[in-house]
Image (spheres, helix red, strand yellow):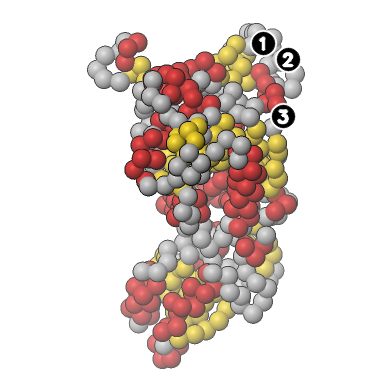
Amino acid sequence: MSEAVTMEKIVSLCKRRGFIFQSSEIYGGLGSCWDYGPMGVQLKRNVKNAWWSTMVEERGDVVGLDCSIMMHPTVWQASGHIDSFSDPLVECKDCNQRWRADQLEKQECPACGGELTEARNFNLMFKTFMGAVEEDAAVVYLRPETAQGIFVNFQNVVSTSRKRLPLGIAQIGKSFRNEITPGNFTFRTREFEQMEMEFFVQPGTDEDWYEYWSHERFEWYKKLGIRAENLRMREHAKDELAHYAKACVDVEYLFPIGWSELEGIANRTDFDLKQHSAWSGKDLSYFDGTTNERYMPYVIEPSAGADRSTLAFLVDAYTEEEVEGASRVVLKLHPELAPVQVAILPLSKNERLVPLAKEVHDRVRKCFHTEYDDTQSIGRRYRRQDEIGTPLCVTVDFDSLEDGQVTIRDRDSLAQIRLPIDNLVDTLRAKLSGEGFGTDSLWAGARA
Ligand code: ATP
């Protein structure tokens, strides 16, 4: 990462190249709400897919789930969110701005220096009404975490999945928190996506599993190209722990705003299942056929933010460099995450070149995320592909018409190789998997 990477540069690139736009921009925007453009939606989807394959598809002990955002209101009483899911809020007596008391360095308003009110607990859950009447009986909440949907379905999943403990249940979905001080682009918003997994284990084995998942989750970011020196683990102090947790460690990333949480791995003990058993009157304990014991499982929870990790991948990939006397901005995204993996670029829009280039595109698009572009000069098109992080560009030129060969250009080393169209798909696959161009080995896994 170049030293100078700032949030402003990331925001500007995201807007310029169609990753992330301000929500409702034509109306002046809505505070801390963001929309993912064509590049951003694919990048975030690739992040979520990478998480899902690692956490669910490549394992035999984790299954998936997709729960509704609105749930029975008692869920939030049982989980403790109605009583405890709050931040300390203070208000400036002069300018009326609101702040999170635990994030202030001085006991005065950061905006105007005014005097602050006493702190009061501000619940972060969004409330709304279900049905056609606005009365207390119809109050529902937008979930502030996806985890509770998993706990209340624990028995449904165990009895239908033919799996035994240890068993994980994973879910990706939107969560909502009425944050007092959202900001720093997509780092903290009021609507965001989480990637959460609850791993149910026999009590007594929980500490080992906690260590295991802390390690796995740290490695996941490295595997997808985040530099090890920009990642660290931070164990929570006892007085920092959430009301349900016995231990918690954060994977932190060195964002332009400093070291900040990317993901938390918590030992939630049997708190949630016990609470839901008590409030629902349904016994959520588990009978372990191998030990002939009945117990309330303990839960290890890796909880990551899809938007926040997408931002981290963008920041870590952002590079400004000098190449042959010219400067370029390049996103050195891992090929698994890049929104476009292969761009097909005819040298020009010439009517003889275009049909062959389109034929090449048709072959390649079945196998990779691709883009076909024949507008503007080839130099400008390379610049665009560098800025959106496309690992490989394939150029079709006039010689291609004669010899049936095309050129692959590597984003990072700028090396080029020429090869027959018939070998193209296999070679692209090998290069995207990390095979070098005869220079240094490429990308990521590589970088770790
Ligand atoms: P913080 O202390 O920063 O408010 P948290 O510890 O409450 O965060 P968790 O409840 O552990 O966060 O949520 C798990 C993950 O969900 C976080 O690591 C983060 O990636 C993501 N997340 C939480 N809140 C937000 C938010 N407001 N905007 C974007 N992502 C969020």
- Residue 444 has which mark? none
User: Does the residue tagged 2 have its C-beta within 8 Å of any atom of ligand 1?
Assistant: no
Q: Are marks 3 and 1 in contact (CB under 8 Å)?
A: no
User: Which is more foreground, mark 3 or mark 1?
Assistant: 3
Mark 1 neighbour density, 10 Å: few (under 14) some (14–19) many (20 or more): many
User: Which amino acid type corresponds to the residue marked 3 in the rendered image?
Assistant: Ala
- Numbered label attached to residue 107: 2
Instruction: Relative to 291, say whether 370 is above or below.
Output: below
Farthest residue, direction front: 292
Q: How far apart, in angstroms, are the residues tagged by discs 1 and 2?
A: 7 Å
- The count of marks equals 3
Which image quadrant: the N terminus? bottom right
Residue drawn at x 46%, y 54% as measured from the top left: 60
Kind of residue at disc 1: Leu
Picture coordinates of residue 212, whole percent (x, y): 62, 47
Q: Nearer the viewer, residue 339 or 150?
A: 150
The percent coordinates of residue 193 (x first, y second) are 47, 39
- The location of residue 150, given as percent across then percent down, is 43, 35
Q: Is residue 377 left or right of residue 208?
A: left
Q: For the residues marked 3 and 2, what is the alpha-carbon distance in whole angstroms?
A: 24 Å
Circle 3/circle 2 CB separation < 8 Å: no
Q: Quadrant of residue 133?
A: top left
* SS of the residue under disc 3: loop
